[in-house]
């Protein structure tokens, strides 16, 4: 995400490296390069020009403290302006109403159906809502079936009426059923076209007038670049939508849509899709996105993802096992499962400050744990719990069963035992420190 833009911006800031102060000349030179970087990222021309003018105005005459280098100050100014350009603060979703009605809009192929499922999954698992998905795309072959498959995968009901070709009547019937069944959110998946046309716009406008939704969300494929902004303008003129959803932000996108949409249509980006999994949906935080664009990572989002998978009771049990040096392969499998639920591995690693650039050319497969899991699953319950010694004959059987070789099995066993020992030592030292801290008040007396 934003790799090319990040690299270009970093090169632009090097112009100020070694400079003793910020001057009109070196700022102009830097911003000329920054503007090129933004245009190459497919940022709207007027947006890029205004952005550079704003940064230049703030930078010239800025006093540079002796402890702060001109390059560092410029990075700070650009960071703040990027965050402001993308909206400044995150904007939540409106869930007032009973039921709350959320109307999806966008072109065909933008990811409306998948996003509808992701949003339903988020509202159910994180907000405690009871959503209903309404299948109102009556034109695209298998659109209704696709939504049913998505709904079944996340355990969310789907309302459909395959005998009807009237999306307004279907949506109204879905809202009626939601009231009867106690669903407090109705997410209406609508039809799209390959391009903006009058027939589609009339239909989505009729849906808006009939349903009076609390939220109208415009779903756009981030990989379409500047076209995404033009499409957003056309939809906004007719619908006056409430927010934008950027999908496929994990792909080979130049990022121009994310930087341009807010300033062009003056509507907030509310969510971003970062993968195919139903959990791959993030609230859009302008500050954090600015951090990532400038290669600063996003440690807050990484911690939040980890906390979502954190089970307090399981953590207590694990802590006891670590202290007694009883951490086994079954516990290890659970930890791998939690990491995999957090999302794409390369995307997670890029959130760590300084790591994104280091791994940009590495191909980190989401199946990186596959061989480890295969080896562990090829063990007997006694071997996984380490209640028997895994000798050479057992290792040969495990290698054969997992489709790996003995060298891989030996390496995993060695690394696991070293990690187990280290974790046990760390856990014991942590408990000692807690005891010492608890005794400090008495020592002071």
Image (tube, rainbow, N blue to C red):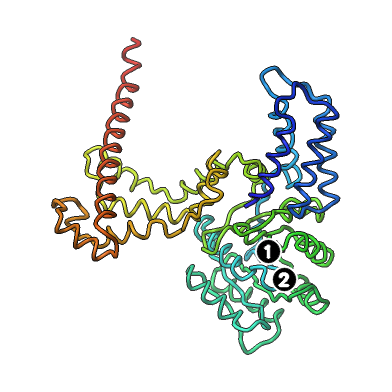
Q: Secondary structure at mark 2?
A: loop
Residue pointed to by mark 1: 221
Q: Nearer the viewer, residue 197 or 418?
A: 418
Q: Position of residue 171 (x, y in %)?
A: 67, 76
User: How far is disc 2 from disc 1 in space, using C-alphas?
Assistant: 9 Å
The answer to which image quadrant residue 444 occupies is top left
Q: Earlier in the sequence, mark 2 or mark 1?
A: 2
Q: Residue 107 shows which numbered tag? A: 2
Q: Nearer the viewer, residue 294 or 279?
A: 294
Q: Residues within 10 Å of mark 1 (few under 14, many from 20)?
A: many
* Residue at image coords 54%, 69%: 182
- Left or right, 106 with reference to 320: right
- Left or right, 426 with reference to 54: left
Establish if 59 lies above or below 240: above
**Count of numbered circles in the view:** 2
Establish if 230 lies above or below 304: below
Q: Secondary structure at mark 1?
A: strand
Q: Position of residue 283 (x, y in %)?
A: 61, 52
């Amino acid at each position: 995400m934003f790799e090319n833009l990040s690299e270009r911006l970093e090169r632009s800031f090097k112009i100020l490296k070694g400079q003793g102060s910020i001057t009109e000349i070196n700022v102009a030179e830097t911003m000329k390069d920054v503007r090129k970087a933004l245009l190459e990222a497919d940022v709207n021309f007027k947006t890029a020009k205004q952005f550079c003018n704003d940064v230049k105005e703030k930078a010239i005459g800025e006093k540079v403290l002796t402890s702060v280098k001109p390059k560092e100050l410029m990075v700070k100014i650009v960071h703040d302006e990027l965050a402001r350009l993308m909206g400044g603060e995150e904007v939540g979703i409106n869930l007032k109403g009973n039921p709350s009605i959320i109307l999806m809009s966008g072109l065909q192929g933008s990811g409306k159906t998948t996003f509808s499922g992701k949003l339903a999954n988020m509202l159910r698992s994180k907000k405690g809502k009871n959503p209903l998905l309404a299948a109102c795309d009556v034109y695209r072959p298998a659109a209704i079936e696709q939504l049913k498959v998505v709904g079944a995968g996340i355990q969310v009901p789907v309302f459909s009426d395959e005998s009807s070709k009237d999306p307004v009547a279907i949506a109204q019937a879905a809202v009626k059923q939601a009231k009867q069944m106690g669903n407090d959110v109705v997410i209406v998946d609508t039809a799209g076209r390959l391009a903006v046309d009058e027939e589609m716009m009339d239909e989505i406008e009729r849906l808006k007038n009939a349903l009076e939704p609390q939220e109208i969300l415009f779903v756009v494929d981030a990989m379409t670049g500047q076209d995404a902004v033009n499409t957003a303008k056309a939809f906004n003129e007719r619908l006056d939508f409430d927010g934008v959803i950027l999908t496929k932000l994990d792909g080979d996108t130049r990022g121009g849509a994310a930087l341009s949409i807010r300033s062009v249509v003056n509507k907030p980006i509310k969510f971003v899709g970062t993968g195919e999994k139903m959990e791959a949906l993030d609230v859009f935080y302008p500050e954090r996105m600015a951090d990532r664009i400038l290669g600063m990572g996003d440690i807050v989002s990484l911690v939040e993802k980890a906390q979502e998978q954190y089970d307090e009771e399981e953590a207590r049990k694990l802590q006891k096992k670590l202290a007694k040096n009883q951490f086994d392969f079954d516990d290890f499998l659970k930890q791998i499962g939690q990491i995999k639920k957090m999302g794409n591995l390369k995307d997670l690693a890029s959130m760590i400050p300084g790591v994104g650039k280091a791994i940009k050319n590495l191909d980190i497969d989401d199946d990186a744990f596959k061989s480890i899991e295969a080896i562990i699953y090829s063990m007997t319950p006694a071997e996984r719990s380490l209640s028997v010694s895994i000798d050479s004959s057992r290792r040969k059987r495990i290698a054969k069963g997992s489709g790996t070789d003995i060298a891989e099995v030996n390496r995993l066993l060695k690394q696991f035992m070293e990690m187990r020992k280290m974790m046990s030592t760390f856990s014991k030292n942590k408990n000692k420190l807690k005891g010492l801290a608890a005794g400090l008040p008495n020592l002071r007396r």
